[in-house]
Image (cartoon, coloured by chain):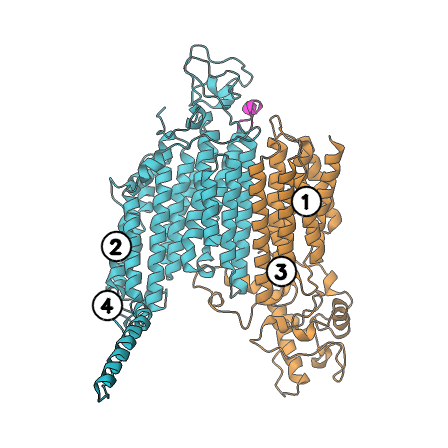
């Protein structure tokens, strides 16, 4: 089921048409329901699954409508700029619902209890992340180039993002269950991703995608850490794992690395991407307050570490440690043979038996050292998360790349700017650009104040309607960074 | 308007009305199948034969998966509280709105029938999504919602490409599978399709994890009874069943005190079932506190037995038993609980 979800997310990212991509992303969200209701089926898990189904269906409905609404020549809609705002708001709401952002978090709040721990990153981070990337691409292609102010709509999206950041961090801080902490930290990080939708600025292209990659990787590592702790001590209650870091120091080191990857510092990709997105949407002191709120999860990690170095509880004392052990070998029997042949036979028998003992002991050895193995695995995950957070593995270049326009375009799939890129010498209000009213005004003006019935382009004014990178491409696909405007 | 498309639109809307208002789960499924099949051909120009075949195959597979989940016994859904005439009128109004707003402000690339059908189906899907606690109705509502979105998409942007048809087929199948899983899980957990208020209240506050999420529910919170009185009536009904079982098997257990909410069943002997002590009209079992709720008699809903002993009991016998013996815990006895109006409970 997880593979199906990953496959659907990959398909959604590969499809150039947003209308098809959102359907694929919705299919990926449905796999989470299958995971939630696996046996044993309880009434509460059914309730959680029903809520999840409702959320996925509503998000899919909004996104399909929004993508279909703007995926055709829309010259006549120049008189109704509110339509673009509605479509944009619908798609942003769909992303917020899929992420479980506040106030759409009710379906996600109990998912941590019903779904297995290892599936949480897929259900709450990776799947919605693919959906968010599709939304970002659609916004850049269909809404951002229109240069509409969309003040009210963007304000609403910013409010949802900020609420998720602040309240999600607060909720994660007050939780006593580690899985709930993971869930709410995902919600808080998703708020930053939602701010990327509100930016409507080419400068937000790279940071938004970088942040989505970073937070999905960091939260996956955090979830892995929780699974390791649960496996070692049999509990997820924070109060019951006091002294865990003394018993399993590798997990302690892993948590420190995860905290560093999730919070970062100035100069690190994670920090810069988060700060850029907040500053693009909330300039001024309010933005810095939100940035502080976004790094507030450091208090959660500190709390866990402080508890980890406390006096171990009985549960921790009885739990598995990371000290390497090996099962005691089978005792060897004394030789009883008297003759040479008899002794030789016994020695051969003993050698074969010894080899078989080793084979049987290896699985037992693995079981005895599973805490150590889990610690090493968490350490590697944390290292990978930190590498991504620092911009390694080509994350920055991948985030800045522009998807190639390839494949067959469905009927009427031209964006608002048409399928041909505008040239610098031509008027941008040529026939290939259906939307003409925004091209005759400056970006700061409301499109309502322009002349919607104007058929001619600007006289002597520089073309204001900017085309998305995809609209500029013609011929062979190529990846190039987003140009500045 | 193309007459053929208009006819298909009427069929699709009719199927959606049946899917939302029918009480029989199989009729609901049939209506859903009609909607899925009709939406596959509601486009102008018509899609190619392969995409149509894929969509139809997906429709059949999705409905088959749901049918597997609801098979076995007669399963009734909660149906529409407003009744099918109201839903039909609402769908008709939405259909007219869809016709009048074709294109939504710009030149449409698809037929008006598709958008109109999408509006109608979308309006019908709202009620199950928002206020349903019946998992089958919820699932059908989710399916109809996505079908409505795809129909409006066809009306706005024209016939989908082959790839989009294929992905949409996958979406239909995935959704059908998810609904089947949920319905199967609900029946396994409670023996019924309705989620009780107790299970929802357990999840109302995100505090400590609900214990029953970590282990199978033994004394299940899912309980029979009317939606508006799940908590009190459910407990009272359970207590009454326990009292009945105590009297039936001569265990000599002291009858537990009756809850106030269901105290209208006055005499202790009045609710011993339709029959007398020697010949009850329904098989008597001994539900105890802690046993799964599926052993409880579901009175008034017409849901047949969930346990082996009750498979022979059909819906009519349940109603006879209810009328005769007030086993539902309602002293009116003049109107079958099935026909009483229930306050809507939101999930």
Q: Position of residue A327 (x, y in %)?
A: 27, 74
Residue drawn where x is 56% and y is 46% of the image: B170
Q: Residues within 10 Å of mark 3 (few under 14, many from 20)?
A: many
Residue at label 4? A323
Which comes sooner in the sequence, label 3 or label 1? Answer: 1
Residue at label 1? B37
Chain that the image shows in orange: B
* Residue A75 sits inside the magenta stretch: yes
Residue A200, quarter of picture? top left
Question: Are labels 4 and 1 assigned to the same chain?
Answer: no
Question: Are labels 3 and 1 assigned to the same chain?
Answer: yes
Secondary element under disc 3, as helix, strand or loop, is helix
Residue drawn where x is 41% and y is 28% of the image: A477
Q: Residues within 10 Å of mark 1 (few under 14, many from 20)?
A: many
Q: Chain letter of disc 1?
A: B
Q: CA distance from mark 3 to mark 2?
A: 47 Å
Q: CA distance from mark 4 to mark 2?
A: 20 Å
Residue A256's tag is: 2
Of A236 and A430, the residue lying toward us: A430
């Amino acid at each position: 089921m997880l593979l199906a979800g990953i496959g659907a997310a990959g398909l959604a990212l590969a499809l150039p048409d947003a209308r098809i991509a959102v359907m694929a992303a919705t299919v990926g969200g449905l796999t989470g329901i299958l995971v939630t209701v696996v046996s044993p089926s309880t009434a509460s898990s059914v309730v959680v699954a029903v809520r999840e189904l409702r959320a996925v269906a509503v998000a899919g409905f909004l996104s399909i409508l929004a993508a279909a609404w703007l995926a055709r020549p829309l010259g006549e809609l120049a008189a109704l700029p509110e339509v673009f705002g509605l479509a944009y708001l619908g798609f942003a709401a769909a992303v917020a619902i899929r992420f479980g952002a506040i106030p759409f978090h009710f379906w996600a709040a109990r998912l941590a209890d019903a779904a297995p721990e290892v599936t949480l990153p897929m259900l709450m981070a990776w799947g919605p992340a693919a959906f968010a990337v599709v939304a970002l691409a659609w916004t850049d292609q269909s809404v951002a180039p229109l240069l509409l102010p969309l003040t009210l709509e963007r304000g609403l999206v910013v409010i949802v993002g900020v609420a998720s950041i602040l309240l999600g961090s607060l909720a994660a801080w007050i939780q006593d269950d580690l899985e709930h902490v993971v869930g709410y930290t995902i919600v808080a990080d998703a708020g930053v991703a939602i701010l990327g939708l509100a930016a409507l600025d080419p400068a937000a292209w790279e940071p938004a995608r970088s942040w989505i990659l970073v937070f999905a990787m960091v939260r996956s590592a955090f979830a892995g850490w929780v699974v390791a702790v649960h496996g070692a001590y049999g509990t997820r209650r924070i109060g019951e794992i006091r002294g865990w870091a003394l018993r399993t120091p590798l997990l302690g080191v892993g948590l420190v690395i995860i905290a560093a990857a999730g919070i970062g510092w100035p100069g690190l990709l994670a920090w810069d991407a988060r700060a850029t997105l907040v500053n693009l949407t909330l300039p001024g002191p309010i933005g810095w307050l939100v940035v502080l709120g976004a790094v507030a999860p450091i208090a959660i990690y500190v709390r866990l570490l402080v508890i980890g170095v406390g006096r171990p509880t009985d549960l921790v004392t009885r739990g598995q440690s990371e000290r390497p052990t090996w099962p005691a070998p089978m005792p060897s029997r004394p030789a009883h043979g008297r003759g040479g042949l008899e002794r030789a036979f016994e020695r051969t028998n003993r050698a074969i038996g010894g080899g078989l003992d080793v084979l049987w002991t290896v699985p037992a050895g693995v079981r005895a050292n599973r805490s150590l193995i889990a610690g090493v695995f968490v350490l590697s995950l944390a290292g990978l998360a930190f590498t991504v957070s620092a911009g390694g593995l080509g994350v920055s270049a991948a985030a800045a790349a522009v998807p190639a326009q390839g494949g067959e375009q469905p009927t009427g799939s031209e964006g608002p700017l048409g399928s041909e890129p505008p040239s610098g010498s031509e008027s941008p209000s040529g026939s290939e650009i259906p939307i003409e009213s925004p091209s005759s005004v400056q970006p700061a003006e409301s499109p309502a104040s322009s002349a919607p019935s104007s058929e001619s382009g600007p006289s002597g004014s520089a073309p204001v309607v900017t085309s998305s990178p995809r609209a500029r491409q013609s011929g062979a696909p190529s990846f190039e960074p987003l140009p500045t405007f | 308007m193309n007459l053929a498309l208009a006819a298909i639109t009427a069929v699709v809307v009719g199927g959606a009305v049946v899917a939302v208002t029918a009480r029989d789960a199989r009729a609901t499924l049939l209506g859903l199948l009609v909607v899925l099949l009709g939406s596959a051909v509601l486009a102008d120009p018509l899609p190619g034969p392969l995409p149509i075949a894929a969509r139809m195959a997906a429709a059949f597979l999705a409905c088959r998966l749901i049918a597997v989940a609801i098979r076995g016994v007669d399963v009734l859904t909660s149906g529409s509280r407003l009744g099918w005439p109201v839903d039909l009128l609402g769908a008709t109004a939405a259909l007219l709105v869809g016709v009048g707003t074709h294109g939504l402000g710009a030149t449409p690339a698809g037929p008006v029938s598709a958008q109109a059908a999408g509006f109608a189906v979308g309006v019908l899907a709202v009620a199950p999504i928002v206020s349903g606690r019946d998992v089958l109705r919820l699932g059908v509502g989710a399916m109809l919602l996505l079908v409505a979105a795809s129909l409006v998409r066809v009306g706005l942007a024209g016939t989908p490409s082959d790839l989009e048809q294929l992905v949409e087929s996958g979406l239909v199948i995935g959704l059908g599978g998810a609904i089947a899983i949920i319905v199967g899980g609900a029946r396994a957990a409670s023996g019924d399709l309705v989620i009780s208020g107790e299970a929802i209240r357990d999840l109302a506050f995100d505090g400590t994890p609900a214990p029953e999420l970590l282990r199978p529910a033994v004394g299940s919170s899912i309980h029979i009874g009317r939606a508006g009185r799940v908590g009190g009536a459910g407990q009272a009904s359970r207590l009454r069943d326990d009292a009945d079982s105590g009297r039936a098997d001569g265990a000599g257990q002291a009858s537990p005190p009756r809850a106030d909410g269901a105290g209208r069943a006055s005499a202790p002997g009045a609710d011993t079932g339709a029959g007398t002590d020697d010949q009850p009209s329904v098989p008597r079992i001994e539900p105890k506190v802690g046993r799964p709720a599926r052993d409880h008699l579901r009175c008034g809903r017409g849901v047949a037995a969930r346990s082996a002993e009750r498979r022979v009991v059909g819906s009519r016998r349940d109603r006879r038993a209810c009328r005769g013996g007030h086993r539902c815990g309602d002293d009116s006895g003049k109107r079958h609980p099935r026909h009483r109006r229930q306050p809507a409970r939101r999930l």
